[in-house]
Image (tube, rainbow, N blue to C red):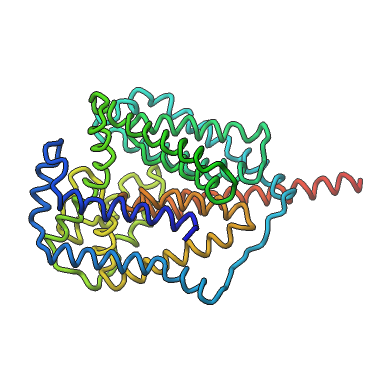
Amino acid sequence: MHKLHSKFFIFGFLYYLILPLFVGVYSLFVNYPGMSRWHDDFLLLNENDILIYFLTISTFLFSFFLFDVFLKFINKKIYFLKTDAIILHKELYWVNLICIPLVIFSVFISIFNFSLLIKGYAVDHHQVAAVKGMLTTSTMVLLYVALVNYISKYDKLITKPVLYCVIFSSFILLFSGTRMYSLIVILAFLGNYITYRTINKKLLFSISAGLFVLLLLVGLLRMGSDVKLDLLAYIFLAEPIFTWWSASTYLSGNEFNFLSTPISFFSSVINFIPSFLLPNKSMYMVDLSELATFEAPLGANSIYVGIQANFGYFFGLIYLFFLGVFYTVLNMMARSNMYIRAYYLCCCAVLPFQFFRDGFFIVNKQVMWNFLIVPLFIIVLSKIILIIVDRKNKVLVRD
């Protein structure tokens, strides 16, 4: 399982679905903020609940990797049309040019809403949700373009605004309290080094550890706490622990769900519609709280709750199987096509953290809208422009 999506999925699985169990069983961090109530809810679970949970997520894990194991067994590989470097670079000129208005838009909303954004946790979520939504969407689309530029070695002046905007927006989002999207940017580029480039392992580990500690320190500083080793450990574990709160209360408050219709999952398509076209789109989406009884005091929902409430156990196995098919096929196609490689890296960057805690409303929008539909529209538009320009040039040459 040397593939990038395998590594990221296993990390997320252990971090979000296994680690909180140890914290609960061994009563760790009881005296830290929020943990007393968390442990009270954990104690409502009996041994049978924990056993069912463990067996369920184990089969989920197996289902995700089943297709990959099958392909290895039959020794079958899938390839896709290789991108021509010369044609790709011509297209990327227009892709980056088309993205200039998006760059200007991202910088504009960052600067004019800077004071609102940097207040982070001190501001009511609803006050900044619209601004953050626009900024995260534009940053993720530009991330895809920046990755295509980078992995195809297209390093021209026209590419600089996109790259610098992604970096600038990532810092704005980081200090606004939206660390997840900054982390996705880091993971996407890091994933390229892990998978497609040769790099010193010790150097890679040092850089990764340094960036991770930086994110933890930002969390401590925003809490107004002094930098201490035990607090760093708490910040590191607080993310999966409080996300798992929803799983804990779901297990104690609901019967085991064998089969369900994924109403909430399918309603996530509504989230693709830009807010300025449908301001009240959340009213038309089916929230998980309408399908099951659980608590998520800090907003994040465990993927366990998302799958069980939406699909039930049996459909959940099918969902994870096809998710594994999706990533395995993408990985194979990404070997020869730079557009697909960038998409694969972006989708992988979602796996270790966002997939396990942010719910289908956000994850599906990331994978299908931010990283696929919008970039595909830009690429197709660039191809059309390139064809028109080439035809005009041929006519001029003939004349």
Q: Residue at x 31, y 49 (%)?
A: 358
Q: Is residue 255 left or right of residue 309?
A: left
Q: Residue at x 82, y 45 (%)?
A: 393
Q: Quadrant of residue 252?
A: bottom left
Tag count: 0
Q: Is residue 92 left or right of residue 362?
A: right
Q: Residue 73 location in percent, x, y?
A: 51, 75
Q: Identify whether 293 is placed above or below 109.
A: below
Q: Is residue 65 left or right of residue 83?
A: left
Foreground residue, 72 or 344? Answer: 72
Q: Residue 310 location in percent, x, y?
A: 27, 64
Foreground residue, 18 or 120? Answer: 18
Q: Residue 342 location in percent, x, y?
A: 55, 50
Q: Residue at x 45, y 71 (%)?
A: 67
The residue lying furthest to the front in this view is: 202
Q: Quadrant of residue 153?
A: top right
Q: Quadrant of residue 219?
A: top left
Q: Residue 150 location in percent, x, y?
A: 61, 41
Foreground residue, 139 or 195? Answer: 195
Q: Identify whether 214 is placed above or below 39.
A: above
Q: Residue at x 47, y 36 (%)?
A: 207
Foreground residue, 21 or 95? Answer: 21
Report the quarter where the C terminus lies.
top right
The residue lying furthest to the bottom in this view is: 74
